[in-house]
Amino acid sequence: MKYSIVTFGCRVNQADSLVIEDGLRARGGVVADPRDADVVVVNTCSVTASADQGARQTIRRIARDNPRVRIVVTGCYATRRPDEVGALPNVVRVIANPAKETLADRIDVDLGLTTADRYSARGDGACGASSLEPGIAGRTALTLRVQTGCEERCAYCIIPRTRGRCQSRPLHEVLAELRRAVAAGYREIWITGVHLGSYGRDLLDGTTLETLVRALAGWPDDVLFRISSLEPMDCTNAIVDLVADSPRLAPHFHLPLQHGADEILRLMRRPYTTGFYERLVGRIYDRMPHAAVGSDIIVGFPGETDEQVERMLMLLESLPLTYLHVFPYSDRPGTEAADLPAKVSGVAIRARAQAVRTLGERLSTRFQARQLGSRRRALTMDDGSRAITDNYLKLRIPPGRSRNEWLQVVIGGSPGALAGELASARSL
């Protein structure tokens, strides 16, 4: 069986796609271009209307380029609009998020594959053994989902309906999976979840995200753990201190602010204020002036005014942030925000989004300029000509390295075109 996986959206989806990939490879699947695959899995996002549209366009293009392909669709859009997705060309099965982990088994059934078929497809007699390793799906780092579901009720968000209630993987299972990943050669692992800060609450055994982070901080192997998106109210002082004090934890935080006006945060039902966010980022910067701190911003929420946008821009300019992800607001049917009055025009939303993106570029340039001349640990990526530092700077390095090597680099070049000079010829 020749397969391809197309992934949209967040790091949780990326982690889910790796699990699917692991299952398909263990069954003898061979990765192929979508134009030549027997089956294509499309793992969708539904955070915005444009995410839905992108998935539809991709599915139609795959079917057009490969008329005999069988397309299996999963993810949040597939969960939210299964009939709509199922009507798209060449879609043979729609699998909701709760059944994602059984997807590889279902593909076997759909294609009528026997054990002999799987051996034949792989061609080397190996079937049933997991084969994830650095470089699979073009990724040097592994993304591991430790939790799914969300029980927050942000006014704009459909994800609680598509991902369901919080479900955490038991700590012993997470640690076993991490040991397996390290044994497979992974040197950087992203820890992710739909609402990562809620990790452990549903286990009712005292496990919390801090419990997990503390275990990562004391990990015996030479591996770097990167904590994925974390809601501001879940980024506790203890977690900040663990990251600051442990070489196993990347000095990198992604803390979605969503808006810079308290009135809009209240309408969004976000459980913090801009003042709280300022203090949190300030504490991180005090402990780790070199840390990367990224954020998400939504523009055009119903009722948003020009004055509130200006206030947000002033706040963002004052914070030591290193990058911004900007999301133009779009109604999600079934959410509270979809029924709010005072909609912002599309023209205004686009203009405001561009203003925030422009500011985000300045923030990135400012951070990169501050890092010039500093010495950082970095992991080689791709063909070995690029590396990513512990504080999330991507840079070019001299040729001659292979993927997945630890290096010490001195950051040079210029903002937007960073280069790393090897501080030591010895990989670490």
Image (cartoon, rainbow, N blue to C red):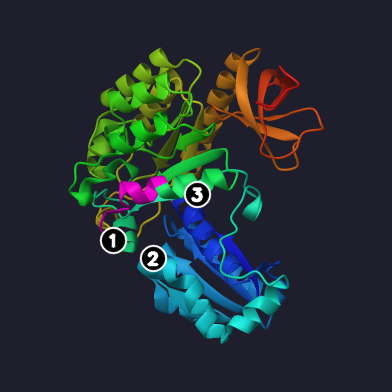
Q: Amino acid at mark 2?
A: Asn
Secondary element type, mark 1:
loop
Q: Nearer the viewer, residue 307 or 152?
A: 152
The answer to whether residue 239 is left or right of residue 246 is left
Residue 83 is situated, as x and y percent measured from the top left of the image, at 41, 79
Q: How packed is label 1: few (under 14 Cα within 10 Å), some, or many (20 or more)?
A: some
Residue wearing tag 2: 97
Residue 347 appears in view: no
State which tag comes first along the sequence, 3 or 1: 1
The residue positioned 34% from the left and 31% from the top of the image is 214
The numbered disc on residue 164 is 1
Labelled pair 1, 2 in contact (Cβ < 8 Å) = yes
Residue 107 is situated, as x and y percent measured from the top left of the image, at 52, 78
* Quadrant in which residue 84 is drawn: bottom left
Q: Amino acid at mark 3?
A: Arg
Q: Does the stretch in magenta take in 168?
A: yes
Q: Nearer the viewer, residue 80 or 405?
A: 405
Residue wearing tag 3: 180
Residue 305 is situated, as x and y percent measured from the top left of the image, at 34, 37
The residue positioned 53% from the left and 57% from the top of the image is 18
Q: CA distance from mark 1 to mark 2?
A: 9 Å
* Quadrant in which residue 36 is drawn: bottom right
* Quadrant in which residue 376 is drawn: top right
Q: How packed is label 2: few (under 14 Cα within 10 Å), some, or many (20 or more)?
A: many
Q: Does the stretch in magenta take in 386?
A: no
Secondary element type, mark 3:
helix
Which residues are drawn in magenta? 164-175
Q: Amino acid at mark 1?
A: Gly
* Vertical order, 276 against 259 (above or below): above
Q: CA distance from mark 3 to mark 2?
A: 24 Å
